[in-house]
Image: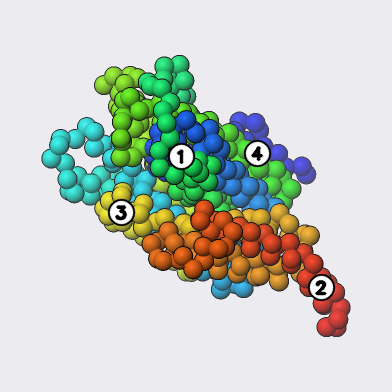
Amino acid sequence: MKQSLKLTDIIAVGFMLFAFFLGAGNIIFPPIAGQMAGEHVYSAMGGFLITAVGLPLLTIIAIGIAGGSWQQLTRDLPPKVAMIMAILMFVIIGPAFAAPRTGLVAYEMAAKPFMSAEAGQLSLTLFSIAFFSIAMFFAWSQGKLIDTIGKFLTPALFIGLIILAIAVFVNPQGDIVAATGNYIEQPLTTGFFEGYNTMDTFGALMFGILIIDALKKKGITEHKATTKYLTAAGCIAALGLAFVYVSLFYLGATSSAVAPGAANGGAILTAYTHALFGSSGQIVLSVIVLIACLTTAIGLISACADYFSSICKVTYKTWVIVVGVACAVVANVGLTQLIALSVPVLFLLYPVAIALVALAFVRKMMPNPRLAYRVVILVATCFAVLDAAKVAGADMSAFSMLPLFNHGMAWVIPTFVSMIAVRFVGKKEDELVTENA
């Protein structure tokens, strides 16, 4: 029997995925990047869209092609290596960085503007407890994620973003000025790396699995149908993200008059929204940010709990509590410190994730997939360590002769050269089985 979904359900699944992606980093990074890029905003935007939209979409599709689970995506790697990779990625997008960041951004942009100037650590602590308690409540009912997020929270979020985008393009608050910082000489690559900060490629590895679980609850279990609807959901989410990023980049590029020298994207958004809508604009922005951060927190907590419960005897609901509490604790570190700590880790793991996704698309072309995966992932990891060490502040000048090293992309050429090389190395697995027999 042919398995199919109604159009409304397809849209709901796509909206659910979009809501999972659109969180703290997606909102705070594009405005500051747009302001710094200035006259080079379109080049910077292009680089950002590659890593913040293109890579997550390809990752979603790769999960469908691989079979719909982390185990199938990494089946050609040693099981312990695959598990370590998964744990590191889940910790990063979960309690260590991305999930706590949603609570911090929600506090800074949605709650703090309405508090007194004396609001301090206690107010952040109380907000974190309330925010992650709500996120845990929604994540608790795993089977209702599509109905809760895809059909209710996301439409409200998207309407708010559309209103803001229209206002930005109809009534820009300033002229586009000269570029600053790295955007002067390297707008494309700088935008590319800025897209790392959204952590959406890691998120896609986890959210794709959640979407597949949601599809199963809708009766979609066949591989072909699952891949089809997963790809459709990914395209809907990608279009939504691209719309948001283009709007926020343009907002940042035209913000120099209302938010000169802003410290972060949150400050730019707050000043710009106030200039467009007056005092009521802060309420509009607070609602947008709160819903965006909350939906992402729900997705991240659910994804982490789902994976950790699959590798140990602790139940899903117990992991929801553990991860949620950990997020609330880490959120009290502070936004600036959290972002600074995450950057070297992102430079280490992003190349590995990109290599894994690329391999999923070319696996059938490899004579020996097991050899190919192990060689390519090892090469990507080794060169990613160099880039991460450089970003962390270590003296890596001895490696400056490597291609693209000065751009923070020393891993690119070796990784893809190794991918081409293993295409011609090794015998097919069926040939090895015949010989051994």
Report the amino acid beneath label 1: Ile
For label 3, the crowd category at 10 Å Cα-Cα, with few meaning under 14, some 14 to 19 and many 20 or more, is few
User: Quick one: which residue is furthest to the bottom in this view?
Assistant: 437
Looking at the image, residue 303 lies above or below residue 50: below
Tag 3 or tag 1, which sits nearer the N-term?
1
For label 2, the crowd category at 10 Å Cα-Cα, with few meaning under 14, some 14 to 19 and many 20 or more, is few
Looking at the image, residue 247 lies above or below residue 357: above
**Tag 1–tag 3 contact (CB < 8 Å):** no
Q: Secondary structure at mark 3?
A: helix
State the CA–CA distance, disc 2 to disc 4: 36 Å
Q: Nearer the viewer, mark 2 or mark 4?
A: 2
Tell me residue 156's x, y (percent).
Answer: 44, 28
Q: Which residue is mark 3?
A: 337
Q: Secondary structure at mark 1?
A: loop
State the CA–CA distance, disc 1 to disc 4: 37 Å
Q: Which mark is residue 232?
A: 4
Give the left or right position of residue 34, taking residue 284 as reference. Answer: right
Question: Which residue is at a point 77% across and 64% down the rendered structure image?
Answer: 423
Q: Secondary structure at mark 4?
A: helix
Q: Which residue is mark 1?
A: 184
Tag 4 or tag 2, which sits nearer the N-term?
4
Q: Which mark is residue 427?
A: 2
Report the amino acid beneath label 2: Lys
State the CA–CA distance, disc 1 to disc 2: 49 Å
Report the amino acid beneath label 4: Ala
Looking at the image, residue 371 lies above or below residue 27: below
